Amino acid sequence: MNTGGARDGGALVGAPVVEGDWEYQPVRLPPDVTRISATVQLGIRAEFGGWELARTLLYADGTRKVWLRRKLSRSSLVAGLAT
């Protein structure tokens, strides 16, 4: 099921959601993505996107669902008000 997300290295990346002072982004990793590959993908998002790991779920079929979060910056809050 595609919920409008984009594929990135086998991962299905959902649209960011803002809750309070935090921005959350769901990422679904299919079962064929190894732990090492998942670690690298999430590490790149952390390093270059400012994301940190908020929550993970491992399903019985091997699929992982990960929620990343980052603190909203003042500039992104102002940009959101301008639209």
Image (cartoon, rainbow, N blue to C red):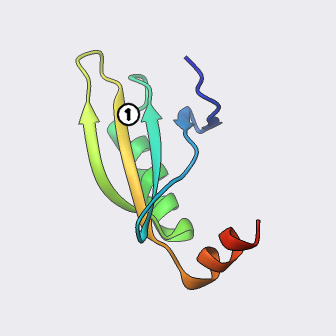
Location of residue 71 in the rendering, given as x and y in whole percent from the top left corner: 43, 73
Observer-nearest residue: 66 or 30?
66
| 4 is higher (above) or lower (below) than 78 | above
Q: Quadrant of residue 20?
A: bottom left
Q: Quadrant of residue 32?
A: top left
Q: Secondary structure at mark 1?
A: loop
Q: Residue at x 49, y 73 (%)?
A: 72
> The C terminus is located in which quarter?
bottom right
> The N terminus is located in which quarter?
top right
Q: Residue at x 44, y 34 (%)?
A: 28
Observer-nearest residue: 77 or 16?
77
| 23 is higher (above) or lower (below) than 1 | below
Q: Residue at x 53, y 80 (%)?
A: 73
Location of residue 10 in the rendering, given as x and y in whole percent from the top left corner: 56, 32
Q: Which residue is mark 1?
A: 34
| 55 is higher (above) or lower (below) than 71 | above
**Residue furthest out toward the right:** 83
**Residue furthest out toward the bottom:** 74
Q: Quadrant of residue 4?
A: top right
> In this rendering, would 21 be left or right of 4?
left
Counting the numbered discs, the total is: 1
> In this rendering, would 70 be left or right of 15?
left
Disc 1 marks which amino acid? Thr
| 57 is higher (above) or lower (below) than 46 | above
Q: Residue at x 55, y 40 (%)?
A: 14
Location of residue 40 in the rendering, given as x and y in whole percent from the top left corner: 44, 52
- Neighbour tally class for label 1: few under 14, some 14-19, many 20 plus, Cα within 10 Å: few
